[in-house]
Image: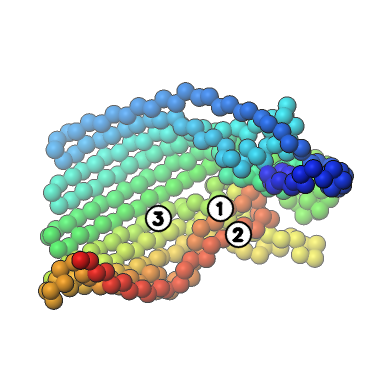
Amino acid sequence: SASGFVDCFATNTAANTTYAAINPTLQGPQQRVVKYTRVLPSVGVGYGFDNRTSVVASYSKNLSLPATDNLYNAFFFPANTAEAQPAPETTDSFDFGVRYRTSALQAQLSGWYTTYQNRTASAYDPVLDATIFRNLGTVEKYGIDGSIAWQPIPELALYAFGSYLKSKIKDNTPAGTCSASNVSAAIYGCTVVGAPAFNQTAGKRESGAPEYTLGGSARGTLGPVELGVTAKRTGPRYINDENLPVRQIISGTLTDVYPAKAPAYWLVNLDARLNLAQWGLEKTHFQLNVYNLFDQFYVGGFSGGPNSVNVPFVQIGAPRTVSGTMVIAF
């Protein structure tokens, strides 16, 4: 099938014949050879102004081959068609950074730009009218990353980081053929039944990726006690590649059922360790961890979707969790 699923009835000819009649798009056993060849140059350069400050720059071209599942999915299509050989994802990446380092301080700031050809996230099957994986075509991504680590005294270490991400899909992506319901709901850019349908993705952000992240950590030691806290804020993420609210057709009306973005959230974790050496247990300690200290309800990971009527599966973040561990070594 288009999803790569295999049914097998061995030598039961009657069962195979019946199954083939029920499933006219069935593909029988076959073997295919696909080859992908690319030249992948990479170059980098660095320069140190002194013992503290340096700059680095690099360029690389990379190739990401279709996953095994995607290749099996392609068996659904005749061998002499373009769909039978999924295009590999290629990238051109440029990076530039500045670094500063002393005995107590380390800081860096970097910018990057990546352009994707055949950006792959999932696929659309025009025969089954189902999304298997999607090829977003040309996508541009660029951003800034920065971090700073400071240890003013041996007993205290501080760290902060932040990043900003921007992406842009160049073109609209195929979504099959316009149906009467598509035209009446004015989705996929449909105005005429039977015309090609497209997800309205041109100029939009790629879904599933946060617009920014920032956070920090602090770790201190006081005698036998070690304390640490980490905090991270994940920025809003678009639910779909059209950057529109999630919509469903309810009683013939296209209705918004969820906002266009998953909201930003903070996640704070604590940890503490008590070393028991002063009580004669040199290699023993008790560890206490608190995950999601403020019991924040948040949407964790999700892969995004191709359009506003696609409802993705998401992972809800874990609630506040407290765990303790006693480690004993001999």
* Relative to 228, residue 137 above or below: above
Labelled pair 3, 1 in contact (Cβ < 8 Å) = no
Specify the quadrant that holds the N terminus: top right
Point 28% across, 61% down: residue: 217
Q: What residue does disc 3 label? A: 213
What residue is shown with label 2? 313
Secondary structure, mark 3, is strand
Coordinates of residue 94 in the picture (x, y in percent): 39, 33
- SS at mark 2 in the image: loop
Spot occupied by residue 247 in the image (x, y as percentages of width and height): 68, 59
> How would you rate the neighbour count of disc 3 (Cα within 10 Å): few for under 14, some for 14-19, many for 20 or more?
some
- In the image, what residue type sits under mark 2? Phe
Distance in Å between CA atoms under marks 2 and 1:
8 Å
| Label located before the other in sequence (3 or 2) | 3
Q: Residues within 10 Å of mark 1 (few under 14, many from 20)?
A: some
Which residue shows up at 39% across the image and 39% down it? 112
Q: Position of residue 180 (x, y in %)?
A: 84, 50
Q: Which residue is mark 1?
A: 303
The mark closer to the camera, 3 or 2, is 2
Which label was assigned to residue 151?
Answer: none
User: Which of the two discs, 3 and 1, labels the residue nearer the N terminus?
Assistant: 3
Answer yes or no: is residue 226 visible: no
Judging from the image, what secondary structure is the residue with disc 1 in?
Answer: loop
In this view, 245 is above or below 288: above
Which residue is rendered at x = 24% and y = 41% of the image? 99
Is residue 138 found left or right of 39 in the rendered image? right
The answer to whether 315 appears left or right of 287 in the picture is: right
Kindly indicate whether the residue at mark 1 contacts the one at mark 2 (C-beta within 8 angstroms).
Answer: yes
- The furthest residue to the bottom: 279
